[in-house]
Amino acid sequence: MRLLTLGDPIDTVGHILTVFSELRKLKGVEAVLDRLLCEARWLAKADAGTIFMVKNDRLVFSLVHNDSLFSANEVNKNFYLNADMPIDDTSIAGYVAKRGEAVQIDDAYDIDPAYPFRFNTAFDVKTGYRTRSVLSLPIKNSREKIIAVIQIINSLDEERNPVPFSKESHAYVSLLAHHAGTAIENAVITSELVLRMMKMAELRDPSETGAHVQRVGAYSAEIYHKLALNRGVCTEELKRTKDLIRVASMLHDVGKVGVSDLILKKPAKLTDEEYEVMKMHTIYGGQLFANAASELDALAGEIALNHHMHFGGGGYPGKITDFENPKMPGPPMRGDEIPLPARITALADVFDALTARRVYKPAWPDEKALDLITSESGKQFDPEVVDAFLAVIDVITAIREKFIEPGVAAKAADKPETAP
Ligand SMILES: [Fe+2]
Ligand SMILES: [Fe+2]
């Protein structure tokens, strides 16, 4: 709950400074954008908003909030909208991204003809929403390059009627946008670093593609979100952990860099001995993050080590405590002894392996994959995780449509190591 009320400029600027330091602590781009949009909307009492990221000379819808249509704290497929538009004068955000100027509109349906753009009513027509006031601002990085546009919609008065954005709210959101670029850029660097680390693993095991790890990270984040809501975890803790889980679960198979190409790329079934060597990737991953320097490292280590453990017993590598002299299988582990983020990643990884096309198998239809996951509830998978996963299946599908495999069919052979 917020104790601060808008009105006192010194308090508000102080609050914005606190937000900057908190944004710097977040790891994933999604978490930074979410916090930024929440704060901008709060400062301007805006009902809705969108953040577009500049990617390949286009504006990609990267986050959408709309309190009238869905809660920003729920698990929602609209967070994974798969759409983009050109950077040009035909749209408000395109104009802002092209020229680097802020635009404020009091009524989207009555735009000053001096502007070259018109408001695109497609979203309003589809949802019945009525966009009125719009405030759109560029976000620049430290080299003054435009990397994103933040657009907030419908400032609300006390009766929740849309009114024009006030001068104060425009100034506060400008201040926020002005300094947000560094936080976004840092998060992009972290995520690119993770993808680069996974690229090394992908070179060894072609099933670990960038798209696969992004999907597993996003699936895990959303499953955790739903499960945490079910458990009544407070919003602040939920968002912080969700951010860490998204990044850490992307690294689940990073230990494959330690397994020989001869095994990972073998175009035939592994022998028992080879399979034992391949299973070592969990221990290598755990070793990589042993003596964790940060919370993210600790979480990545837990996930890498335990993502092949089975909830009801079984799986590998068992309980490993001594990374100097690891013995596999370690003593058995089951249920809550397996860290929750690893139980979540286990399901996300298997679901993605099943429903993605691989050289050795076609993509399984969703129903078949869901049947298997349901039948493994309490055995391979944690029932609480299965329930949360099934409850957000429409979001899972939206994630899959957003992170598509480029030319997966061309990839070399791989082992069905995550498939049952
Ligand atoms: Fe694995
Ligand atoms: Fe994987």
Image: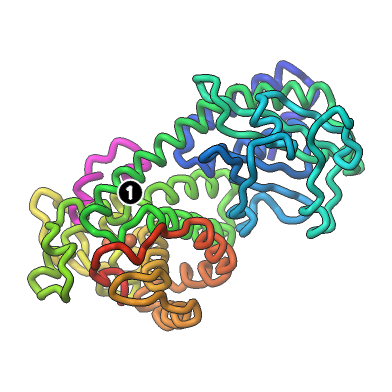
The magenta region covers: 283-298
Vertical placement of residue 157 versus 407, above or below? above
Q: Could you tell me residue 138's position as x and y percent?
A: 65, 28
Residue indicated by mark 1: 300
Vertical placement of residue 411 versus 116, above or below? below
At horizontal 55% and vertical 31% (from top left) the residue drawn is: 147
In this orientation, which residue lies closer to the viewer: 253 or 208?
A: 208
Q: Could you tell me residue 9's position as x and y percent?
A: 75, 18
The kind of residue tagged 1 is: Ala
At horizontal 53% and vertical 44% (from top left) the residue drawn is: 30
* Secondary structure character of the magenta stretch overall: helix
In which quadrant is the N terminus drawn? Answer: top right
Does residue 20 appear in the picture of this structure?
no
Q: Quadrant of residue 2?
A: top right
Quarter of image, ligand 2: bottom left
Q: Could you tell me residue 42's position as x and y percent?
A: 73, 36
At horizontal 38% and vertical 55% (from top left) the residue drawn is: 213
Q: Quadrant of residue 105?
A: top right
